[in-house]
Image: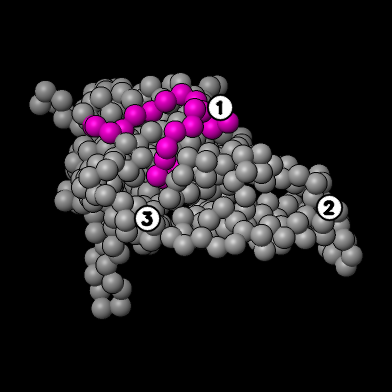
Amino acid sequence: MDPDRQPVDDFLSRARQAFADGTVTMLVLAGYRGEGDLKRVQARAVVLKGMPMLSLLYRHATKDITKNFSVDEGLQTLKTLLGSDFRNAQLTTQTQDIQLAFSKKGKATVRVGKAQQPAGEPLASGQGARPVSSGHNRDKHRYLDLDRPFLVELGVTDRDHKLVPAMSRKWKQINKFIEVFASALAASPLGTGKDGSDPIRVADFGSGKGYLTFAIHDYLRGVLGRPTRVTGVELRQELVDLCNGAIERLGLEGLTFDAGDVRSYAPQPLDVMIALHACDIATDYAIHMGIRAGASVIMCSPCCHKEVRPQLLSPHPLRPILQHGVHLGQEAEMLTDGIRALLLDAAGYDTQVFEFISLEHTNKNKMILAVKRAMPKAAAPVLAQIDEIKRFYGIKAQCLETLLKADALV
């Protein structure tokens, strides 16, 4: 036997036993180094036609593929992938956390530790996960429960409505997003003055795989009982097809996905405009779309801030500090999002800029949240502040300001 494969055999032997005992909570292969856009492979035990099977979920950047094997065939498939296509594997049982890792030279090692429940995450249960109460910690309020069918379709939970451990960050993000939205909704005309029989119209630009799009539809329709029309807008047709397929399987009404770009998407009346991780000036086009469409709530999480940075001067006495590129980039981000917030203020919105949450696959966690105010206030003093800031830093043009002034919206 090849001694370098002994740790692999040991890892898979532990996996076989854990599957047989029914104690597996997660088995995932990560650190992909092959060709294509495959991200990871997740394995779980299933029973098909009365036979125990191993279901392998191949998670790609734009699609998921499931293949079912007998237990022996499934473990053999994992064995061929380990060390060749994947550098790491993690097996978590109810009592142990077992990690397999390969060095750059191909040497494999296995580490065994005690399994731990991620801090602050819900404990999986068939009735919707809830953290256990203690004398020192109150239960976290969850705006959505794990028993929602869309979570199974999107791979956040398994068929028993248990949280997939690898999706714990995504689950946390979904709930935080709905928490922020619920607060904004209550403070907006949608929560205080809009006829409850009128559908709430939502557009989510750059919707991706639709996690948050499905969540906001489920919250409005399933939790609040409000009629709604939610549209996810995404550039990649394969993701649009993926999400519309899930809608058809779930039989959902009032939810659809379209292929499109925020810069060219046909404007229509909106109540809520969402754009998370729209790159550079795409965020400006999204905010402009929301204001022009009369949205009561605008939620943006900006990504990249390229437009303003090359325009910036380094005025005295900031020049010695801004000679460092990292500081200049941080300044461009602060100024861009600060000007956006002021422009929203001038356009009739109460605006906040705050840290949202670390989203999956990115460290961008800032949110611009704008709620249409009930009473107007003078825009001139705010526009004067923007002009003063631009003069100080030498900013000649900012996309959102240009768009709003062209339509006489500020």
Left or right? Give the position of 26 relative to 391: left
Q: Secondary structure at mark 1?
A: loop
Q: Secondary structure at mark 2?
A: loop
How far is disc 3 from disc 2 in space, using C-alphas? 38 Å
The amino acid pointed to by label 3 is Pro
Residues marked 1 and 3 touching at CB (< 8 Å)? no
Mark 2 crowd level (few <14, some 14–19, many ≥20, 10 Å Cα): some
The amino acid pointed to by label 2 is Gly
* Relative vertical location of residue 390 with respect to residue 71 in this rendering, above or below: below
The answer to which of 110 and 66 lies nearer the viewer is: 66
Left or right? Give the position of 316 relative to 226: right
The amino acid pointed to by label 1 is Ser
Residue located 86% across and 57% down the image: 314
Label disc, if present, on residue 189 of the rendered structure: 3
Q: Residue furthest bottom?
A: 135
The answer to which of 360 and 365 lies nearer the viewer is: 365
Mark 3 crowd level (few <14, some 14–19, many ≥20, 10 Å Cα): some
Q: Which residue is mark 2?
A: 394
* Relative vertical location of residue 256 with respect to residue 367 in this rendering, above or below: above
**Location of residue 389 in the rendering, given as x and y in whole percent from the top left corner:** 76, 59
Label disc, if present, on residue 264 of the rendered structure: 1
Mark 1 crowd level (few <14, some 14–19, many ≥20, 10 Å Cα): few
Residue located 66% across and 44% down the image: 405
The answer to which of 2 and 256 lies nearer the viewer is: 256
Taking the magenta stretch, the answer to whether it contains residue 409 is: no
Task: Say which quarter of the image contains residue 221.
Answer: top left
Compare marks 3 and 2 and give the one earlier in the sequence: 3
**Location of residue 368 in the rendering, given as x and y in whole percent from the top left corner:** 54, 54
Q: Give the magenta-colored segment's residue range.
A: 252-273
Task: Say which quarter of the image contains residue 380.
Answer: bottom right
**Location of residue 316 in the rendering, given as x and y in whole percent from the top left corner:** 89, 65
Residue 25 visible? The answer is no
